[in-house]
Image: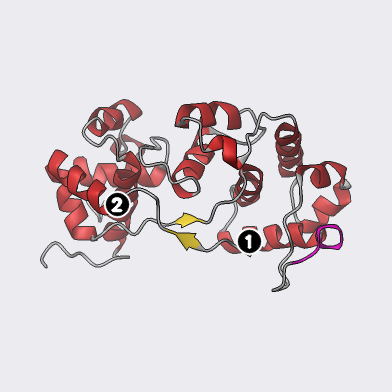
Amino acid sequence: MRPRPRSPRYDTALACRELCAADPKLARLITSAGPCTLHLASAQSPFEALTESIVYQQLHGKAAATIHRRLLEGFAPICGTTRTGHPIHFSPQHLIDCPNEQLRAAGLSHNKSLALRDLAAKTIDGTVPTLARIRRMTDEAIIEHLTQVRGIGRWTVEMLLIFRLGRPDVLPVSDYGVRKGFALTFGKLKPADKVTPLDLPKPAEMEKRAKKWHPWCSVASWYMWRACDLANGSIEDRSGD
């Protein structure tokens, strides 16, 4: 049911070369982590992508996936299924019209049900843009529009910008992984250290460093996550290759 991943429209190899030239410390991380393999989910409408984001908030992946599947299946009698038997995604009006019991049966909390109904209403009234319109908007304009939805904060929209819309210059300064990766790469934090709040950088510190990274902050952020993977031993260190 989840969309197949695809490559960004921008050139990640070019981004890496320019980031390496601009920031030697980041260059060492890029060498260690290897080529950028950032992939995007195939284009969903903002309504569909944000529906999934709301369902997944504060839940483990498997539990969230189960709730998301049940939510889609609950609308199958109305919306139908694809040739492969997967439920077709419901419309905002379908969500507005469905009874609360249907949302509870899928496993949604009261707050998430309210957030989804608000998302549906704001999609219908145009606050949440269509995919065609959102592609023409700036990053900040998208953030301004979508954070008007109950339960949608700046971080959620930044993830949408990076991993759904493929925007190349997004720096999610509130993301824990990005902050930890920054501390490992540019601060005094060591892989074996227990992380404390004092170890993590402030947004202003990250934004100052990121002046070197424009227009490729999304790729640099992806490498901050990889720095965490290296520290955890999740990916092989290639610095000696």
Would you say residue 194 is visible in this rendering?
Answer: no
Give the residue number, with chain letter if any, for mark 2.
Answer: 12
Mark 2 secondary-structure assignment: helix
Mark 1 secondary-structure assignment: helix
Prevalent SS, magenta region: helix
Q: Quadrant of the N terminus?
A: bottom right
Residue 102 lies, in percent from the top left, at: 85, 53
Q: Which mark is residue 195?
A: none
Q: At 30% from the left edge and 40% from the top edge, which residue is drawn?
A: 216
Q: Quadrant of the C terminus?
A: bottom left
Q: At 33% from the left edge and 44% from the top edge, which residue is drawn?
A: 221
Three-letter code, disc 2: Thr
Mark nearest the camera among 1 and 2 is 2
Q: At 82% from the left edge and 47% from the top edge, which residue is drawn?
A: 94
Of the pair 237 and 214, the residue shown nearer to us: 214
Residue 80 among magenta residues: yes
Check the image and report above or below for 234 versus 144: below
Residue furthest bottom in the image:
84
Mark toward the start of the polypeptide (1 vs 2): 2
Q: CA distance from mark 1 to mark 2?
A: 29 Å
Range of residues picked out in magenta: 76-81
**Classed neighbour count for the residue bearing mark 1: other residues with Cα under 10 Å, few (<14), some (14–19), many (≥20):** some
Tell whether 234 sits left or right of 122: left
Residue 182 lies, in percent from the top left, at: 27, 42
Q: At 72% from the left edge and 67% from the top edge, which residue is drawn?
A: 82
Residue 222 lies, in percent from the top left, at: 34, 49
Where, by quadrant of the figure, is residue 208 drawn? top left
Give the residue number, with chain letter if any, for mark 1.
Answer: 65
Tell whether 119 sits left or right of 219: right
